[in-house]
Image (cartoon, helix red, strand yellow):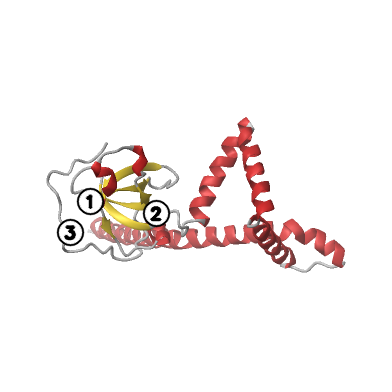
């Protein structure tokens, strides 16, 4: 009888411990999911602050005779603004063109430079006029929709067929690396406009759909063509 009671007590005890471990494990992973993005973001911001502040901060601190936190960051921002002003005049554009050509002429530096340039273009030029608007298209097959960016009208001089007048250039970026993708030439009535901005669409693509900026507006009058052949 005593052994039976002991078994019951041990069984209840192990059940409680098991339930407690399950709850604590759930809390642990929930906290991990919440804390890791915040901690990484704060660390990156702190690292970038130290990096920017250290570019000119040490020299300015020695010149002033005392350490003033943040003066390097302000100076770095001022230098970047100055470079931006210089880059927008004729002489500055020529210098940047020569520098760009020079960096792309060095075999090893070329790969590193082009890779960093592509990433920076995606991050800092996501609102650029290079992409005119965000659309939805059926790709890579019918009834399968994806986001694309209108980059302009199809160059008529490429071919002399009547359909060329009705084509637009659509860039379909890959996920999660939008620096690569596909260039499609589609008829204007095969695309659907959305209410997404360029930056919102980029965030959605970079996150693989985890970041949902809002509802994508699809006109109710849109007609799906049964004879539509998806390019491959």
Pointer 2: residues within 10 angstroms few (<14), some, or many (20+)? few
Residue under the point 52% across and 56% down? 124
- 226 sits left or right of 172 in the view: left
Inter-mark Cα distance, 1 to 2: 26 Å
Which of the marked residues, 3 or 1, is nearer the chain's N terminus? 1
Q: Nearer the viewer, mark 1 or mark 2?
A: 1
Inter-mark Cα distance, 3 to 2: 28 Å
Give me the disc on residue 190: 1
| Near-viewer residue (34 or 129) | 129
Q: Secondary structure at mark 2?
A: loop
Quadrant in the picture for residue 65:
bottom right
In percent of width and height, residue 94 lies at 66, 47
- 86 sits left or right of 61 in the view: left
The residue most toward the left is: 226
| Near-viewer residue (75 or 88) | 88
Give me the disc on residue 220: none
According to the picture, the residue beneath numbered tag 2 turns out to be 207
């Amino acid at each position: 009888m005593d052994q039976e009671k002991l078994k019951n007590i041990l069984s209840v005890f192990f059940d409680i411990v098991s339930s407690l471990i399950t709850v604590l494990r759930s809390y642990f992973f929930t906290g991990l999911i919440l804390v890791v993005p915040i901690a990484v973001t704060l660390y990156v911001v702190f690292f970038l602050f130290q990096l920017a502040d250290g570019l000119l901060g040490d020299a300015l601190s020695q010149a002033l005779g005392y350490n003033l936190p943040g003066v390097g960051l302000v100076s770095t921002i001022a230098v970047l603004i100055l470079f931006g002003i210089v880059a927008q005049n004729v002489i500055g554009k020529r210098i940047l063109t020569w520098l760009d050509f020079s960096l792309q002429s060095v075999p090893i530096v070329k790969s590193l430079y082009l890779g960093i340039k592509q990433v920076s273009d995606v991050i800092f030029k996501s609102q650029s006029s290079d992409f005119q608007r965000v659309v939805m298209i059926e790709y890579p097959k019918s009834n399968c929709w994806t986001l694309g960016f209108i980059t302009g009208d199809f160059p008529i001089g490429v071919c002399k067929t009547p359909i060329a007048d009705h084509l637009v250039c659509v860039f379909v970026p890959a996920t999660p690396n939008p620096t690569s993708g596909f260039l499609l030439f589609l008829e204007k009535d095969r695309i659907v406009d959305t209410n997404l901005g360029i930056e919102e669409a980029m965030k959605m693509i970079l996150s693989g759909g985890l970041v949902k900026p809002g509802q994508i507006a699809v006109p109710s009058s849109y007609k799906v063509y049964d004879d539509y052949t998806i390019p491959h």
